[in-house]
Amino acid sequence: MTGVAAGLAAAPGRLQALRTKDAVLTAALVVLALLVVASLAGRVVPGLNDGTTTVGGRFEAPSLAHPLGTDSLGRSLLARLLEGIGTTFLLSAVAVVCTAVIATALGILAAYLGGWVREVVMRIGDVLYAFPSILLALLVAAAFGAGITASLAAIVLITVPLMTRQVAAAAAQVARRDFVTSARISGVSAPVIMARHLLTNVSGTVVIQATYALSVAILVEGGLSFLGYGVQLPASSLGLLASEGNLYLLTAPWILISSGGAMVLAILAVTLVGDSLRDRLEPRQAVDLT
Amino acid sequence: MTLVELDAVTVRFGTGPRAVHAMREVSFSVDEGQTVGLVGESGSGKSTAASVALGLRAPTTGAVLFDGQPLRRRRMAGEMQAVLQHPMWALNPRMSVAASIAEPLQVRTRDRGAVRARVAEMLDQVALAPELGARHPHELSGGQRQRVAIARALITSPRFIVFDEAVSALDVSVQAQILQLIQRLQAEHGFGALFISHDMAVVRYLADRVVVMRGGEVVEDAGAADVAAGFTHPYSRALLEER
């Protein structure tokens, strides 16, 4: 069979694979949108927006009045869960934006300037990368004290090294392109080359890595809050609720099931969106569809 | 008058017994308005010679002179340009054709009107329709992209242009068109050119003089008219006979 004939024969399979991938992406986006809308609704819809008031007895099982049941103080778990989703998403998103800015700047500087700048950036990244992420998060929490600031700093420190490495690798490829050499010959300054030529051509990598960083951020926030070093009461987050659910696992399993389930859904959806973006923005690195 | 001169240039990578010499005591010059062809197989040091001539790489020993003065790349940026090998990577895929052509000029002037007018003039000079200025590189053919790269190189009216394997990636009919374009533009603008290729026929078509490199050394430096009869080195003759 010739290459063309083989390609044509494989085409329906590829088409089917593309359709499946589109369906997965759509499902992941719908789940993410539902979680975001639900967390926003939790802040504005009367009856859903108060996770601090006692509305019933302790550990009431899910019912029509309280769809997810109540917690150890008789508060609506649905209200607390929606607030928790909002807190976790907001905290993770802010941390990932910080990570993206820092990692993009460091990665592009390391790739374009090379030499000792590259060595310093990469070795610091290696040192941070060598720490198990939860250990690094606990060290940060010990330094900053438990709370949102510690969670934010921990997520940034954990996600920056990997993203910097990926951005630097992508930027190094771009820096070798002829159009960058031509710009240097033309006297275009280094900051302009980095912004105009490198940044614009690594933006796809940044977006993809940001989605992976977002799933890591949700996990780290959950882990820190679970251990008591992240978001503090009376606020709510998915990790904090999971911690509480763990305490009352036999009495009120719905607390752990709802918070853990929301966390798994969020991480799964974000990761699938990241995979899908990678397939679209970096087709050469995508898995073979045949 | 000599425009660019490489005087006993050596480029060495690494030190000690593992040192690799990309160029050894290489000397040649390009006069105003002259085209010098630089020929040799892969790894002969042609592209290193080009980067040294453009000030992108400093020689380990030896000197590079521009207009009789030591080369200072930043000061002479508008005076020299390059058209490089890969039409696909010669232009930033995120920038429009007009923005790519305008970039070297924008380093020197902020007058947007003047830049726009000059870009239109350059598109006309390389025989591209004005509406192509709004397109992106992936919407152009290989030949069109190389015309854009030439327009970009010409926009600052440089006195010296390096063409590094500028037609190697194009098919034969497009090669001929681009070579004719370069010839016409050089006659109009009078720039000195260093035309690097592994294809002796292409170099002989354009060059006033041919320099042959092998293993980082110049093995032949002859006038193009003498090429057939004047080559004395067996390697140079072998390159001729390949055609």
Image: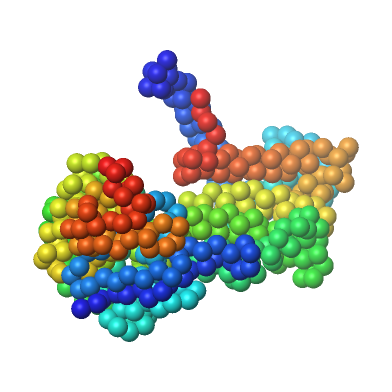
Quadrant of residue B159 in the image? Answer: bottom left
Nearest to the observer: residue A201 or residue A264: A201
Q: Is residue A138 above or below residue B145?
A: below
Q: Is residue A92 above or below residue B159?
A: above
Residue at 52%, 38% in the rendered image? A286
x and y, in percent, of residue A285 in the image: 53, 41
User: Residue lying farthest bottom?
Assistant: B69
Is residue A250 visible to the viewer in this orientation of the structure? Answer: yes
Q: Is residue A236 above or below residue B25?
A: above
Side of B200 relative to A151 (left or right): left
x and y, in percent, of residue B58 in the image: 45, 74
Nearest to the observer: residue A154 or residue B127: B127
Nearest to the observer: residue A45 or residue A273: A273
Residue at 12%, 64% in the rendered image? B187
x and y, in percent, of residue A277 in the image: 50, 43
x and y, in percent, of residue B40 in the image: 36, 54
Q: How is the image coloured?
A: rainbow
Quadrant of residue B113 in the image? Answer: bottom left
Of the 4 image quadrants, the one containing the N terminus of chain A is top left
Residue at 69%, 65% in the rendered image? A123
